[in-house]
Image: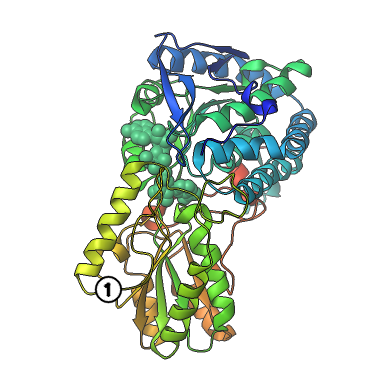
């Protein structure tokens, strides 16, 4: 089925490159196609930016920086607040676009708009609360002031799985801090970014603020944008969200220019269910932690580590819940699970499931691709899974829940930490002492206790080990775009 975008969206999606307040074609004249993953139909052709466009965007961001940095925090705050209001008022339009290019069910897209807008509101509020410090030096001989200053023009590179949230988590604190930005959206979902950027552009222009504050360069060749920008001395900051593999490459490319970097990378979240857990609540939490965006989230529960004594009850409950899910186009009423983002994603999920089954895993539900056009895979629950198997050690990024059993808390913690990743962990238990032991010993930047969702604009989101550097959200998210300046007097 082909789903038409609302007219308020279809005729208003910018498909060009945004440089200094103007949408324009790529300097090469080339475009690339953006498709609906539920139908494989092309939605729009988008300008295919390259090196020249990237450098033009940086020139604009660099020219706007002195003015933007000197703009009163209150004015920056009010701009962000106005963007929050517009995003909220246009929830239906933005959600339709997210579903069209990313595939997630409309209800999830609406929730993503609210979540993304919440970061804009939070940083509108933080923009007027710059951190700082004044104190007497320990020797008593002088005073120390620690001020904060905007880092400078920033390159923001985002993934396809949350096209508004990932932009909002970067653009909002950057603008609040006084930084200007060049955004490189994901090739698969540049439309939502363009729509949101247009809202910001219009607000800047209306207020007589510099239009080069936000620039956007979509491209089918990400490195043709990142390579020249990371080597350019005018750039002062890189904030990246995406895979650990690409993050490591960008860190290396940023090193010669000694850039400040923030890295939100891959995950492999353990979902721990202890023998004292409320099992029906754990099943509901597992659904939330696993199935948002068909399992394509960095915080998706990737491994279900369940105490032997409750494994059967939990696994059967989860399989039952998965049977009740409705796979379909995200814009179809009643759909609860949309497609994966592209064919390669389906092929990969199919391959790791087949390998796990060959190695002895048992399929409770799913384990196949539904017969329909689009990049779908059926919600799948597996148990008798070997903890050394790829389906446990790698980020699945699909609607598949492998269950591994453990015998005691010590073994559960050892299994949870048996990964180079460390973004989030979830635990279901009624024992507060155990919760504190887990908080102390599970190697993750975030821990969800008796809940399957942790993220909040006011809290520091981010990982340890191969899951990243730095945090987004909360006070910490603003610090990523500020540098301390120490004044001795
Ligand atoms: P990806 O690393 O392939 O791409 C992310 C971004 O980097 C895209 O804009 C892409 O165009 C760009 N990119 C790709 N190759 C590049 C290169 N060689 N040079 C410069 N830029 C390049 O990741 P993805 O497939 O878009 O997203 C999925 C990954 O993102 C998963 O690993 C997921 O866990 C991670 N993720 C992490 C978080 C977090 O907050 N930690 C949030 C969402 C997604």
**In-image side of 92 versus 309 (left or right):** right
Q: Residue furthest left?
A: 358
Q: Residue at x 61, y 31 (%)?
A: 5
Q: Residue at x 61, y 23 (%)?
A: 13
| Residue 337 in view here | yes
Residue corresponding to mark 1: 361
Q: Residue furthest bottom?
A: 309
| Residue 487 in view here | no
Q: Residues within 10 Å of mark 1 (few under 14, many from 20)?
A: many
Q: Is residue 482 above or below residue 182?
A: below
Q: How many marks?
A: 1
Q: Position of residue 150 (x, y in %)?
A: 61, 31
| The C terminus - image quarter | top right
Q: Residue at x 54, y 84 (%)?
A: 277
Where disc 1 sits, the SS reads: loop
**In-image side of 248 versus 260 (left or right):** left
**In-image side of 336 versus 339 (left or right):** right
Q: Position of residue 342 (x, y in %)?
A: 38, 41
User: What is the quadrant of residue 390 in the picture?
Assistant: bottom left
The image quadrant where one finds ligand 1 is: top left
Q: Residue at x 58, y 26 (%)?
A: 194
Q: Is residue 199 above or below residue 455?
A: above
Q: Is residue 374 above or below residue 454?
A: above
Residue nearer the viewer, 73 or 113: 113
User: What is the quadrant of residue 359 in the picture?
Assistant: bottom left
Residue nearer the viewer, 440 or 314: 314
Q: Position of residue 372 (x, y in %)?
A: 41, 47
């Amino acid at each position: 089925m082909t789903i038409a975008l609302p007219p308020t969206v279809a005729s208003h999606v910018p498909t060009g490159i945004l440089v200094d307040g103007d949408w324009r074609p790529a300097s090469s004249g080339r475009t690339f196609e953006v498709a609906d993953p539920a139908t494989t139909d092309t939605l729009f052709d988008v300008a295919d930016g390259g090196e020249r466009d990237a450098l033009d965007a940086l020139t604009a961001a660099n020219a706007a920086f002195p003015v933007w940095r000197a703009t009163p925090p209150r004015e920056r705050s009010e701009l962000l607040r106005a963007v929050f209001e517009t995003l909220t008022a246009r929830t239906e339009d933005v959600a339709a676009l997210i579903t069209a290019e990313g595939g997630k069910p409309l209800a999830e897209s609406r929730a993503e708009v609210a979540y993304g807008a919440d970061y804009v509101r939070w940083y509108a509020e933080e923009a007027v609360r710059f951190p700082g410090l004044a104190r007497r030096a320990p020797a008593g001989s002088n005073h120390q002031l620690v001020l904060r200053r905007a880092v400078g023009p920033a390159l923001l590179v985002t993934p396809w799985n949350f096209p508004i949230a990932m932009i909002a988590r970067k653009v909002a604190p950057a603008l609040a801090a006084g930084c200007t930005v060049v955004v490189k959206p994901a090739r698969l979902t540049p439309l939502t970014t363009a729509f949101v950027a247009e809202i910001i552009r219009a607000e800047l222009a209306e207020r007589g603020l510099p239009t080069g504050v936000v620039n956007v360069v979509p491209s089918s060749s990400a490195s043709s944008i990142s390579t020249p920008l990371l080597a350019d001395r005018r750039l002062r900051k890189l904030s990246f969200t995406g895979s650990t593999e690409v993050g490591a490459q960008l860190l290396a490319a940023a090193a010669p220019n000694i850039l400040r970097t923030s890295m939100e990378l891959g995950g492999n979240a353990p979902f721990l269910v202890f023998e004292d857990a409320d099992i029906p609540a754990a099943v509901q939490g597992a659904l939330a932690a696993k199935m948002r965006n068909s399992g394509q989230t960095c915080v998706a529960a990737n491994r279900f580590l369940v105490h032997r004594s409750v494994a059967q009850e939990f696994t059967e409950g989860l399989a039952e819940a998965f049977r009740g899910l409705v796979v379909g186009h995200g814009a179809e009423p009643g759909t609860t699970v949309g497609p994966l983002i592209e064919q390669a994603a389906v092929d990969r999920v199919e391959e790791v499931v087949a390998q796990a089954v060959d190695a002895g895993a048992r399929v409770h539900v799913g384990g196949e691709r539904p017969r329909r056009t689009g990049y779908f895979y059926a919600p799948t629950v597996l148990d008798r899974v070997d903890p050394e198997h790829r389906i446990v050690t790698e980020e699945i990024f699909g609607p598949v829940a492998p269950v591994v059993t453990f015998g005691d808390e010590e073994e559960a913690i050892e299994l949870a930490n048996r990964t180079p990743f460390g973004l989030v962990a979830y635990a279901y238990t009624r024992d507060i002492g155990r919760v504190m032991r887990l908080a102390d010993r599970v190697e993750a930047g975030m821990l969800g206790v008796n809940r399957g969702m942790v993220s909040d604009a006011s809290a520091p989101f981010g990982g340890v080990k191969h899951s990243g550097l730095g945090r987004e959200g909360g006070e910490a998210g603003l610090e990523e775009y500020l540098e301390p300046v120490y004044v001795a007097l």
